[in-house]
Amino acid sequence: MDNCCRMRCLTRDSDSEDQRHLIEEERRFVKDYESLDYDQCFNEPYRRQHKREIQTHGKWLGSKKELLSWVVIFFIGVFTALVAFFIDYFVKRLSMLKLETVNSFLHDCHDVKCGAVSLFVLLAFNVLFVSIAAAFVVFGEPLAAGSGIPEIKCYLNGVKVGHVVRFKTLVSKAVGVLFSVSGGLLVGKEGPMIHSGGVIGAGIPQFQSMTLKKLKFDIPYFRSDKDKRDFVSAGAAAGVAAAFGAPIGGVLFSLEEGSSFWNQSLTWKTLFCTMASSFTLNFLLSGVEHGEWGSFDQSGLLTFGDFQCSTDDNDCHLWTIGDLFIFIIMGFVGGLLGAIFNCINTKLTLFRLRSLSRKGKTAKMLEVVLIGTVTALCAYFGPMFVGTCKTADFANQTNPSLDEVQQFECPNGTYNDMATLMFNTQETAIKQLFHNSEAFSYQALALFFVLFFFLSCWTYGASVPSGLFVPCILCGASYGRFCASLLNGVFHMNTFLGTYSLIGAAAFLGGVVRMTISLTVILIECTNEISYALPIMVTLMVAKWSGDIFNHGIYDIHVFLKGVPLLEWDPPHGATILEASDIMQTRLKYVYPHTRLRSLVNLLRTTAHNAFPVVTLRQPEQTAAPGLPSTPSRNRSESDGLLAANLKYQKSSQVSRMSIDRRRAFTLTTATTELPRVNVTSKFVEADQMSAIQDSLSPLIFHGIILRSTLTALLKRGVGYDENATIPNQPVVESKTLQEDYPRFPDIHDIDATEVNLQHVMDVTPYMNKSPYVVYPTTQLSQVFNLFRTMGLRHLPVINSGGEIVGVITRHDLTHDYIEEIVEAKKNTPSMLSSITTSSGA
């Protein structure tokens, strides 16, 4: 496990150079992810639109939008429940068809030939179903593979993951997961429900679809990444509520594991969404499955049943204080098992990135077929060689249904304990481990745990929709049941088997995913037993602590392997020695308040930046600030009209700035400046860096920031004016028009330049954000990190005390990997002040 200790140590502190080189090689092929615009752009069209709406609607404006948001939230919950019901209904029907067909061949079958036929039928069903599931991913939407929780987590963190909330992804995920579960793969349908809910939450508020182009309503609300993020949070929570019948757990899951930004209003809306999802699914399941419409006795796709002692056993207790110490040990072991699970899955994921991804779609399909075949063989031969025939006596059981046990090749009136676990649906097998007090043999429990451990680890990450919650719960339940059977049989303790199975499930699941608060509530809501709160909470905390010694949770590992710039809750240890000037990017692309359209087109076509500072050069009559060297003047290449327009805007800004002592002219073309990574406001500058600053420092007065999408929308509409006109008249574009193409803004390469007068000049000042968040070069990194993450920023300009922009900070500059590299470099480099002091003393 040494090579898997700490997720990020895979690239830094691991003893294996090959492992580190491998990950660095793979991450070069990963897409360079972009950020989402959670910060509102307060420009003139935005202010003008809201002023007009307030004058027209008055106080009813906010009420109208708020009421519409509650309606949208309700429908997100309802549609999430409908998708969950669709998946559950067809999974049950397909699974029943497969099991009944195979059992019909096994019934009264005692020769090898008959057994071979039943095995062939099982293989045929599994290979067919898993091939269909893989086809929806490989040939449909590759992002539908896996549970989708890492992708949703990244989206809510502020990272733009391509196709993560597309309708095509929803179809591939929903249809694919029902075939992967029905095909016998050791995956769950509950995890993909979270992704499906997130897609529904993103799609419904847009009132349009890129796939279904005719589905489009002209509703101007919720046309920003911030609003979309909030609805995705509610949809993901609704997915949890539908999967586990846990509305409170869904809210806490979205808060703990998903969203990076939260507020009280979102809490109420998310709770309302989860309640709508849970009770809609409850209503459908109760009516369709039992014909009792409105009885509301089926809370979710996965329920654990009622935990209660037999009425004939007066000495039975669900758990005691003595059991709590055993639960702590089980939690510690569960964390270790989860760390091993994550370590093995990391190696498998790296293998898929290195080999299968480069061999094309055929290799991915073959891997899924191989997994399905091996799983079917284990499910068939495991009960045959290890299973034990048990007497089917459920007179005193809390769950007395004989339909949920599997006879396999046992005589009538008996059942095969191994087949009951391997040949049933996973939800049924969980209930058997929780509520079947009849003995499962030690060898059956041990083999089942080992097979489920490695097969589920192998399956997660393959090219099929695959959840991880239910396989981990089932694997952990067998671990807990084995511990309880061992205590009862060897040490003659009177333990409640269902409690130990539940604690084992919590220990292993917590060791894999490292969730605490939300998982505690989810498990309590699944059991309907509040007395389990303390043992579940203690077990999950211990499992998380022991697992974190070796690596991170499975979702965090997959986020890291995909190279997503996820911002964690806090900056890394040691970042207190850094300032904003240490991490900011000094190679800037910027525009002037009045810029020719030709320059803007060239800028957008030659750069990939999503925002540009709007700047003017320093007024020529002012002098340099103390501690800053003067710089040589630029050649004058701007026309007098454009120079006058920029100079007029600069004088009208009424901002007191630091300045330089030489006259400068304004250039028409967009400039690039690169500054050394030093604190330009400090008077302590090393001698070897003085000349670099003198040559490259270009004092630029910062006035605001303008988005790439805004510039593209303006160019698309030919916004600009003739600089030679007596009265410049630039067309006015409203905020609603700028946002009408959201979320698919036009690309600059899709704009026909022949339809735009490239000689015209654009005044970008009405459309820029004049009051963005900014920091100083000397701002502590912890402050920068908290501001960037809390406010959901995409770009953070760095300005000095004179209002001159000296750099820009983006999401990639705040990732743990980059910060830790800068910290290491800072530790190995003497500070400027100490260097100067040493030189003076010498």
Image: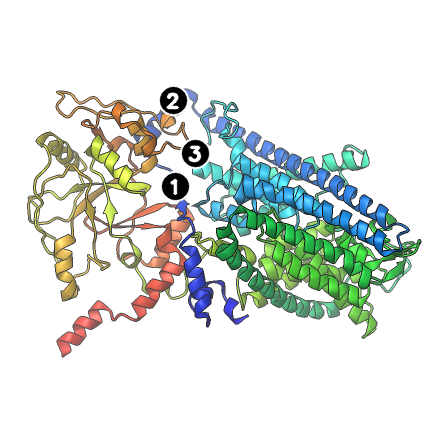
- Crowd class of label 1 (few under 14; some 14 to 19; many from 20; radius 10 Å): some
| Disc 3/disc 1 C-alpha distance (Å) | 15 Å
Res 827 → quadrant: bottom left
Residue drawn at point x = 58 percent, y = 34 percent: 76
Q: Nearer the viewer, mark 1 or mark 2?
A: 1
The disc at residue 743 is 3
Query: Which residue type does callout 1 highlight?
Result: Asp
Query: Which residue type does callout 3 highlight?
Result: Pro
Is residue 108 visible to the viewer in this orientation of the structure?
Answer: yes
| Disc 3/disc 2 C-alpha distance (Å) | 28 Å
- Is tag 1's residue or tag 2's residue first in the polypeptide sequence? 1
- Crowd class of label 3 (few under 14; some 14 to 19; many from 20; radius 10 Å): few
- Is tag 3's residue or tag 2's residue first in the polypeptide sequence? 2
In the visual, does 496 lie left or right of 607? right
Which element type, helix, strand or loop, lies under badge 3?
loop
- Residue 590: x and y in percent read 23, 42
- Crowd class of label 2 (few under 14; some 14 to 19; many from 20; radius 10 Å): few
| Disc 1/disc 2 C-alpha distance (Å) | 25 Å
Which element type, helix, strand or loop, lies under badge 1?
loop
Q: Nearer the viewer, mark 3 or mark 2?
A: 3
Query: Which residue type does callout 2 highlight?
Result: Gln
Q: Which residue is mark 1?
A: 39
The count of marks equals 3
Residue drawn at point x = 33 percent, y = 63 percent: 822
Is residue 536 visible to the viewer in this orientation of the structure?
Answer: no
The answer to whether the residue labelled 3 contacts the one labelled 1, judged by CB atoms less than 8 Å apart, is no
Q: Which residue is mark 2?
A: 55
Indicate how the structure is coloured in the image.
rainbow
Q: Quadrant of the N terminus?
A: bottom right
- Is tag 3's residue or tag 1's residue first in the polypeptide sequence? 1
